Image: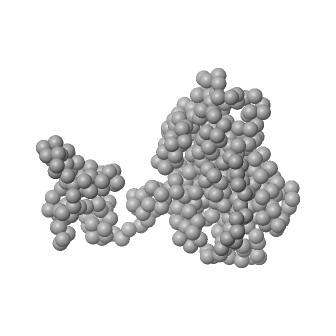
Amino acid sequence: MSSAHPTAPVFRNILEMIGNTPMLEITRIDTGPCQLFVKMESLNPGNSIKDRIAVTMIDAAEKSGKLKKGGRIVEATAGNTGLALALVAGQKGYRLTVVVPDKMSDEKISHLRAMGAEVVLTRSDVAKGHPEYYQDVAEKIAKDDPDAFYASQFTNEANPQAHYDTTAPEIWAQMEGKIDAFVAGIGSGGTVSGVGKFLKERNPKCEIILADPVGSILAPLVNEGKTVVPGSWLVEGIGEDFIPSICHLDLVSKAYAISDEEAFHTARELLKKEGVLAGSSVGTLFAAALKYCREQKEPKRVVTLICDNGAKYLSKMFNDFWMVDNGFIKRPTYGDIRDLIARRHLEREDFCLTPDIPVVQAIKRMRMFSISQMAVVDEKDRVVGILDESDVLIALVRDRDYA
């Protein structure tokens, strides 16, 4: 526990709180002969590493005259860059339009809208060059508005510069210059390029390791030198179907392709054993870091990132039902009709009511679970009826004191 005496500084603006995130050593998960450290970027005020690049890109745009007072910022993002830009835009008085693929979590979309951003949803099953590809849509929106600045994290050199100037020096100082490998993913390529360049300049023997979702083209390119047809993946924020112009893959010495299933289970393990609630991309990074550590024959000091907070994924990979529905948690099979039932009553997976529950509470439960019908069961678990929302409406219209 930290000292009871106040030591933390007082800030005058939330943007001043970006950076200088703590480093945590992993001690409750097997890391082989290595020491594994995670830099807690989820503790930035916007809950992700993207806060760093948002500030740097907007500052650079202001200095260059590309972004004028009261202007509009447009960006294509899987979520965290949008949230970071919303934080900066709100503090500096800019409008923000964020174009996102439709696989993004509901929590991220709600968060963006709550911060005042306009959200444009696009298809996640199309590649670059398709008219509905999220980056192409964002670029067109920016071109059609003379007051707009397209942040373009995938081509903006201020992106890797932010990590070269801030993230990497912090890692180097926290590790006291003793770091043998750095594990990261590639979305825009800014983190790998900025941190990788800095670490290689200080220690040419430091390995830069890529954590990549299965389906991305990057791991096969690094490991085998071949270009493959991109697939699809559910992990958000990393993996690509093209190579961003700011991405320096030549810094990467090895890549690990991590499946969605392994990433999600690893993120859940990280929460249970180390108490770290992290996003889906962290599952990919952490799984790759563990593979690297366990493969080593001699002790090494390895660093990876907790890129964002996992609260935005509670409805997905931290939800057992979502994991079951997507085939990531295997349930016992019986060879009968029970295998076809999505929510089994005997395993307490369904949503049901008892006859004595007030109608108001029944309505609240329907809203909580986003369903319109619920079974009513007695004390012996026998179905005695079905309550439909239309039944509730009719009853309330007939007798307003019914509830």
How far from the left and from the top, in percent, is residue 83? 59, 45
Viewer-closest of 154 and 113:
113
Considering the image in quadrants, where does the N terminus appear? bottom right
Regarding residue 211, the answer to whether it shows in the image is: no
How far from the left and from the top, in percent, is residue 303? 72, 64
How far from the left and from the top, in percent, is residue 295? 69, 72
* Residue in the picture at 79% in, 50% down: 164
Q: What residue occupies the far left of the structure in this picture?
A: 398
Number of numbered discs on residues: 0
Location of residue 260 with respect to 126 vertically, above or below:
below
Tell me where residue 200 sits by quadrant: bottom right
* Residue in the picture at 72% in, 74% down: 34
Viewer-closest of 91 and 281:
91
* Residue in the picture at 25% in, 64% down: 337
Viewer-closest of 34 and 69:
69
How far from the left and from the top, in percent, is residue 52? 70, 48
Location of residue 217 with respect to 305 vertically, above or below:
above
Tell me where residue 133 sits by quadrant: top right
Location of residue 362 with respect to 31 vertically, above or below:
above
Location of residue 191 with respect to 340 vertically, above or below:
above
Regarding residue 277, the answer to whether it shows in the image is: yes
On screen, residue 92 versus residue 331, left or right, reads right
On screen, residue 17 versus residue 330, left or right, reads right
* Residue in the picture at 55% in, 37% down: 117
Viewer-closest of 202 and 169:
169
Question: How is the protein colored in the picture?
Answer: one colour
